[in-house]
């Protein structure tokens, strides 16, 4: 009799059942993310990016076990591809490796000037790049993704592909401050999705971007030229770089820059290794 009442109650209150299920999964009250991250939205869009990951770019990833599962961690990756698909593919690689927490990638400020993109980034877990935002994430023990080359990495010409630009020292300063290991990440394949032949800076400024990319297909083919090429991708997560927990303000600027260069050289070496492994761009 009691069991029958339970079934009737469940049938009459499907919303209540769903709420209980969600609460059980969350194991506690849901707290709104200060940067706008929406886990349910991320779960809805993830299949689309997994399709790109598995079928279109056929990503091969290894070394994700090098990413610590808890505590503040910094991912430092090379940046390329004109559009930041590299962040989404790194996120998919971590998802495939069953990483228990999402990577919170920092994105450049110019993205805020683009239509609809900033809202998408925030809901998917992205955070506008600033030292203050990164510090708040690390203080909470988050996994934070950096592209220390910044826009310079994203805008490399095809003739400059896979030659890493100088790394910003920001991730090193934050690693020292929070005792966060830096996991070097190498991505190969993204440079070929939009072979960048030139940068149209004047038009880019009109739309609030650093430049408008010129590729063999864009703007010649219009919107069709924005379809990325199906290059073969490889991602490698290196062993964490653990810095001495010396306050950054006690180290000179030259020392901080030298540490950032050490991280850049590690990623550059990993990139070269992946390039040597591949037989074809596609």
Image (cartoon, rainbow, N blue to C red):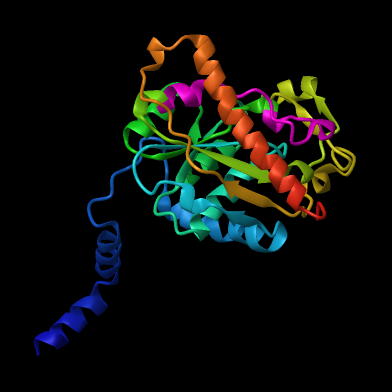
Q: Is residue 210 visible?
A: yes
Q: Is residue 78 visible?
A: no
Apparent side of residue 268 relative to residue 28 in the rendered image (left or right): right
Instruction: Residue at 24% x, 65% y: name it.
Output: 20
**x, y percentage for residue 276?**
76, 47
Q: Is residue 27 above or below residue 18?
A: above
Instruction: Residue at 65% x, 41% y: name it.
Output: 270
Q: Residue furthest bottom?
A: 1
**x, y percentage for residue 163?**
74, 31
Apparent side of residue 186 relative to residue 10 in the rendered image (left or right): right
Apparent side of residue 160 relative to residue 239 in the rendered image (left or right): right
**x, y percentage for residue 271?**
68, 41
User: Which part of the image, by quadrant, shows the C terminus?
Assistant: bottom right
Instruction: Residue at 51% x, 52% y: name it.
Output: 64
Residue 44 painted magenta? no
User: Which part of the image, by quadrant, shows the N terminus?
Assistant: bottom left
Name the residue nearer the viewer: 232 or 81: 232
Instruction: Residue at 68% x, 25% y: name it.
Output: 165
**x, y percentage for residue 81?**
72, 40
Q: What range is drawn magenta here?
A: 153-175
Residue 163 painted magenta? yes
Number of labels in the image equals 0
Q: Quadrant of residue 72?
A: top left
Q: Quadrant of residue 112?
A: top right
């Amino acid at each position: 009799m009691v069991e029958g009442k339970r079934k009737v109650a469940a049938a009459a209150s499907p919303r209540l059942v769903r709420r209980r299920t969600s609460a059980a999964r969350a194991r506690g009250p849901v707290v709104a993310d200060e940067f706008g991250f929406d886990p349910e939205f991320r779960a809805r869009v993830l299949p689309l990016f997994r399709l790109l990951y598995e079928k279109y770019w056929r990503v091969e990833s290894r070394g994700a076990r090098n990413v610590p599962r808890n505590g503040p961690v910094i991912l430092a990756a090379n940046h390329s591809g004109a559009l930041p698909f590299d962040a989404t593919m790194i996120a998919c690689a971590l998802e495939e490796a069953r990483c228990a927490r999402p990577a919170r990638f920092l994105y450049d400020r110019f993205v805020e000037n683009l239509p609809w993109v900033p809202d998408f980034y925030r809901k998917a877990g992205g955070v506008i790049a600033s030292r203050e935002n990164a510090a708040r994430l690390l203080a909470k023990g988050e996994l934070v993704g950096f592209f220390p080359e910044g826009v310079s990495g994203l805008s490399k010409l095809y003739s400059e592909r896979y030659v890493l630009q100088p790394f910003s020292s920001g991730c090193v300063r934050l690693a020292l401050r929070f005792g966060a290991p830096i996991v070097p990440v190498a991505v190969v394949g993204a440079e070929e999705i939009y072979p960048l032949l030139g940068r149209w800076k004047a038009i880019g400024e009109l739309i609030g971007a650093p430049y408008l990319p010129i590729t063999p297909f864009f703007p010649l083919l219009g919107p069709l030229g924005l379809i990325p090429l199906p290059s073969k991708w490889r991602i490698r997560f290196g062993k964490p770089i653990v810095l001495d927990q010396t306050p950054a303000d006690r180290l000179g600027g030259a020392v901080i820059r030298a540490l950032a260069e050490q991280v850049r050289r590690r990623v550059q070496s990993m990139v070269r290794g992946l390039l040597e492994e591949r037989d074809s761009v596609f």
